[in-house]
Amino acid sequence: MNDLASFYAESAESVDSAIARLIDDAGVESERLKQAMVWSLFGGGKRFRPALIFAVGETLDVPQAKLMRAAAAIEMIHTYSLIHDDLPAMDDDDLRRGRKTCHKKFDEATAILAGDALQVLAFGAIAGDETIETEKKLVLVAGLAAAAVKMVAGQQMDLASEGEDVSGEQVEAIHRNKTGALIEYCAAAAAAVSEADAASIQAIKDFAVNLGLLFQITDDLLDVSQTSELLGKTAGKDLTSGKATYPAVFGFEGAVQLANDTHSRSISAIDPFGSKAARLRAIAYSILDRRS
Ligand code: GRG
């Protein structure tokens, strides 16, 4: 296993234990609801967002323990968004992370409720964090709320754009909200817990904006170039549903070029950190080069 792969594996292991504890401590009295939450949480996600929080923490000298609750919270919000996104009223998908979507495994009402429960539990996780000061917790909670609202707004914009002619600016606005906001939050959360100066925080934010866009561009490219088996979800769906994707707006080669440019911008932003940002560089490269 290479260095980044073991970093991802270790991050996933620690955040998964934190999530499991939070679910147990939540005292969910409906076993079916709990099972639906657990089904979607522990379904083989890459845990990219927790790894990103921890990697920014490394760059800004924040120990993982102080970021564990925020990492668990972001993964809960991410999982809730996937559950709701897969529902018949939205993307209507049967497959997620290579197995049945929550509403296919359970039922629609249970899937809606599992998403609802995960969403509120995320805020409770940060509020109950005993490793950081109250003022910092408030910044984390307010930031998560703002990012989650942006994600929902992005989803609405995305739905509204289906079958429409959209410009490059519109596609960027959709994805900066829908996908980018949570990724930007990961970086902002670690920065908020750190003692970093304003210039360093700005550099990390610039990195994250570009990383978020890069993540979506490569996600769109994978949708048209990979099989459902490899992706663990229905491939080619964006095209058939007339979604506002980067390849649809810029063409495949145009989107590849944009991915390269966005990657370069993310890397330049963290230049000032030198070797302290090695992990962030590796993450950005792995997103540019990802296969699933
Ligand atoms: C329904 C409230 C609501 C929001 C939905 C994020 C989102 C908004 C929908 C997800 C649909 C989608 C395919 C978004 C594109 C990028 C993305 C977030 C991909 C999934 O994230 P990964 O690759 O997934 O990190 P894993 O499974 O690895 O966790």
Image (cartoon, rainbow, N blue to C red):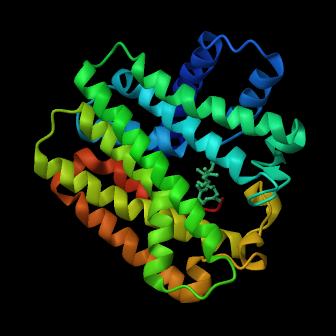
Give the image location of residue 166, x and y in percent. 55, 85
| Above or below, 280 relative to 22 | below
Using residue 189 as the reference point, say whether residue 116 is left or right of it: right
Using residue 87 as the reference point, say whether residue 78 is left or right of it: left
Asked whether residue 286 appears in the rendered view, the answer is no
Give the image location of residue 224, x and y in percent. 71, 76
| Above or below, 13 relative to 106 | above
Residue at 60% in and 76% down: 245
Residue at 74% in and 12% down: 29
- Residue 182 versus residue 194: which sits nearer the camera? 182
Residue at 75% in and 61% down: 91
Using residue 53 as the reference point, say whether residue 289 is left or right of it: right
Residue at 52% in and 29% down: 122
Give the image location of residue 84, x and y in percent. 70, 47
Using residue 292 as the reference point, say whether residue 55 is left or right of it: left
Task: Tell me the quadrant of ligand 1.
Answer: bottom right
Quadrant for the N terminus in the image? top right
- Residue 163 versus residue 45: which sits nearer the camera? 163
Quadrant for the C terminus in the image? bottom right
Give the image location of residue 203, x and y in percent. 21, 55
